[in-house]
Image (cartoon, grey):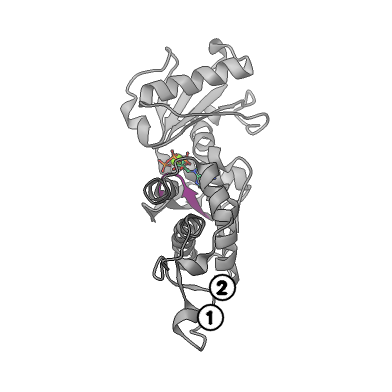
């Protein structure tokens, strides 16, 4: 059994992957745990411990630990005496994204604390770029503007929000259509900010802005690479409002966003699948 651990900037994810004797057959029965801790070592050890206890796994069953993510650089020792290997995070996202989507030759937008855009082909995975705009941006802005630190609370508030109170829309500034944009398209995020805007509206404005930025980043990446499909991964992939914002972008730009199952574990799964003894 191989354990993949992704020590992200905010959360640590761990997965267990079983391979056949010949190194194939991965993907059956992948087990997953998520944790959060103040420091990298506690986080990695905690995720591993949680995995063992919750799934009744014995430490002797683990052949190797594959670690990746922002925090992996700080782990310079084998964990619990098990051979521990580092995996480049971009590679892990690429391999995990291809595995979970069941597709090759894809663009992946990994929405974590920040956002990374990756071009993945079998044997060739590259980092196209990214943006500091991601889940961390939503939390940071919500903390200061709405005094909220819990994601569920932010989502509940945003569901009742009206974008028209905070965003300057095309219809606010033009009587005719500009290019392919709708009258309801955002001309400027937070560019209107009426005095009557409520916290609900601001929450909606934050989510809309973050997913619009990510969506457009994805669109440009897709256009450059001549594809019309983007695989969305990371914790930020599971966001109903974000998905609606991205759907509007699909309608305008004909680039489709796909959400594979277990997408928040993409990086950890990709790390586990990078095990060289596999083939
Ligand atoms: N439903 C959600 N929608 C959008 N963002 C979310 C949601 N739930 C949590 N987040 C945000 O996702 C971020 C964590 O995601 P994830 O675990 O994928 O990132 P990470 O791996 O820790 O960070 P990174 O990959 O950028 O180093 C946090 O900023 C958190 O606020
Ligand atoms: Mg991550």
What secondary structure do most residues of the magenta stretch adopt? strand
Question: Which residue, given by chain and number where applicable, does mark 1 sit on?
Answer: 180
Question: Which residue, given by chain and number where applicable, does mark 2 sit on?
Answer: 252
Indicate the quadrant containing the C terminus: top left, top right, bottom left or bottom right.
top right
Which residue is drawn at the image coordinates 49% and 39% (left, top)?
267
Task: From this view, report whether residue 124 is shown above or below residue 66.
Answer: below
Which residue is drawn at the image coordinates 56% and 16% (left, top)?
52
* Kind of element beneath mark 2: helix
Q: In this view, does 236 lie to the left or right of 90?
A: right
Residue 64 visible at all: no
Stretch of the chain drawn in magenta: 107-114
Task: From this view, report whether residue 32 is shown above or below residue 112.
Answer: above
Residue 256, quarter of the rendered image: bottom right
Is 255 in front, or is 83?
255
As drawn, the label of residue 82 is: none
Is 65 in front, or is 110?
110
Point out residue 17 in the picture as x, y percentages from the top left corner. Answer: 59, 27
Determine the residue located farthest toward the front in the rendered image.
196
Q: Look at the image and say whether residue 110 sits in the magenta stretch.
A: yes
Disc 1, disc 2: CB below 8 Å? yes
Point out residue 264 in the picture as x, y percentages from the top left corner. Answer: 54, 40
Task: From this view, report whether residue 255 is shown above or below residue 109.
Answer: below
Is 2 in front, or is 205?
205
* Beta carbon of the mark 2 residue lies under 8 A of ligand 1: no
Indicate the quadrant containing the N terminus: top left, top right, bottom left or bottom right.
top right
Residue 45, quarter of the rendered image: top left
């Amino acid at each position: 059994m191989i354990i993949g651990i992704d020590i992200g900037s905010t959360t640590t994810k761990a997965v267990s992957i079983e391979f056949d004797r010949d190194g194939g057959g991965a993907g059956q029965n992948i087990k997953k745990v998520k944790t959060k801790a103040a420091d990298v070592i506690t986080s990695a050890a905690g995720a591993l411990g949680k995995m063992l206890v919750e799934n009744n796994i014995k430490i002797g069953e683990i052949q190797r630990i594959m670690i990746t993510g922002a925090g992996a650089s700080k782990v310079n020792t084998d964990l619990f005496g098990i051979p521990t290997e580092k995996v480049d995070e971009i590679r892990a996202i690429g391999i995990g994204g291809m595995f979970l989507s069941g597709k090759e030759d894809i663009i992946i937008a990994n929405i974590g604390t920040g956002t990374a855009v990756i071009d993945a082909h079998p044997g060739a995975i590259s980092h196209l770029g990214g943006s500091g705009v991601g889940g961390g941006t939503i939390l940071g802005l919500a903390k200061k503007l709405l005094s909220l630190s819990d994601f569920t609370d932010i989502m509940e508030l945003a569901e009742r929000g009206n974008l028209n109170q905070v965003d300057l829309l095309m219809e606010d500034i033009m009587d005719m259509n500009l290019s392919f944009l709708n009258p309801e398209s955002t001309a400027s995020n937070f560019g209107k900010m009426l005095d009557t805007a409520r916290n609900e509206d601001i929450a909606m404005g934050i989510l809309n802005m973050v997913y619009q930025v990510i969506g457009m980043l994805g669109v440009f990446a897709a256009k450059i690479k001549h594809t019309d499909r983007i695989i969305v991964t990371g914790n930020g992939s599971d966001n109903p409002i974000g998905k609606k914002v991205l759907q509007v972008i699909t309608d305008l730009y004909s680039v489709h966003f796909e959400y594979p199952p277990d997408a928040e574990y993409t990086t950890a799964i990709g790390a586990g699948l990078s095990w060289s003894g596999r083939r």
